[in-house]
Image (cartoon, helix red, strand yellow):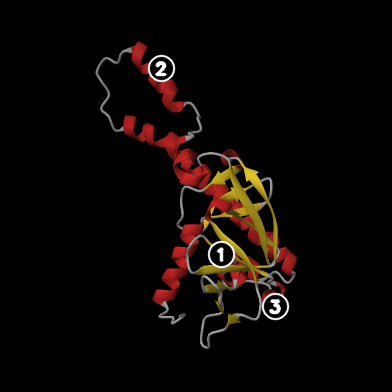
Amino acid sequence: MADKKMTQLADPQAAIASYLDDLLHTATEQANQQDTQAVAKPVVAIASQPLPAKPEPAIAAPLLQAVTAPQRSPIAGLQARPEWAEKPFECLIFTVAGLQLAVPLVLLGGVHRIDDNVRSMPGSPSWYMGIRSGRDKNLRVVDSAEWIMAGRAPANARASYRFVIHLNNSDWGLACDNVAQSFTLNPQQVRWRTSRSQRPWLAGTVIEQMCALLDVQSMANLLARAEREQHLDLS
């Protein structure tokens, strides 16, 4: 439904807002499902046990209260956090076609300007811009709007790209419009995702800044896998 909705939006700003709403909905809905499952599982386990002939009231009553009480479990959220988010961490916000994204500085390989050194590759997919030559490393530059928005990017998004976000020590870089100042983020300010069946690159959402927090390693792995599966020669 989200894909169909995006194709029906004529206004690029409305499309971007809808996509961000979808990101926030995905992260929040999955987190709520984890909380519900954490409460529901003990009920199933107890219901499957045979009832004793003469239950002890002193034990049964507190046990029933513990099971039926609507408690939110913090365990799922803690398990969803990556190692670099066990304590406050620095983040850098950048924009792609009006969409705000955040990357942890500890996994930021660098920020480079897009220039004439980006060499396009004939026959490459729409999400691949080309190779950016550098003194120390050549980067495979990704059209971030095409990759992240899965073909639903606003028209002429590439015309606004000014920088490349290098993903850690990988061979990949994300093209972006602008780069903002870094800021400190507490882990509690992020709605962490515990399920990655959709958008594995989305670690969570920062509600206050209204931006998506990247899982840098997952993003790099997805790009490398796409390169292998599509038999791309990007060297």
- Residue 137: image location, x then y, percent: 51, 71
- Residue 202: image location, x then y, percent: 53, 56
Which residue appears farthest toward the bottom when viewing the image?
122
Q: Residues within 10 Å of mark 3 (few under 14, many from 20)?
A: few
* Callout 2: SS: helix
Query: Residue at horizontal 47%, vertical 80%?
Result: 234
- Whether residue 205 is situated above or below residue 5 in the rendered picture: above
Q: Residues within 10 Å of mark 1 (few under 14, many from 20)?
A: many
Dot 2 amino acid type: Pro
- Whether residue 74 is situated above or below residue 183 in the rendered picture: above
The quarter of the picture where the N terminus appears is bottom right
The quarter of the picture where the C terminus appears is bottom left
Is 224 left, or right, of 21 in this rendering? left
- Whether residue 130 is situated above or below residue 57 in the rendered picture: below
Residue picked out by circle 1: 166
Q: Earlier in the sequence, mark 3 or mark 2?
A: 2
Q: Nearer the viewer, mark 3 or mark 2?
A: 3
Q: Mark 1 and mark 3: span between their CA atoms?
A: 22 Å
Which residue appears farthest toward the front when viewing the image?
135
Q: Earlier in the sequence, mark 2 or mark 1?
A: 2
29, 142: nearer the viewer? 142
* Callout 3: SS: loop
Dot 3 amino acid type: Asn
Residue picked out by circle 2: 62
Q: Which mark is residue 92?
A: none
Q: Nearer the viewer, mark 2 or mark 1?
A: 1
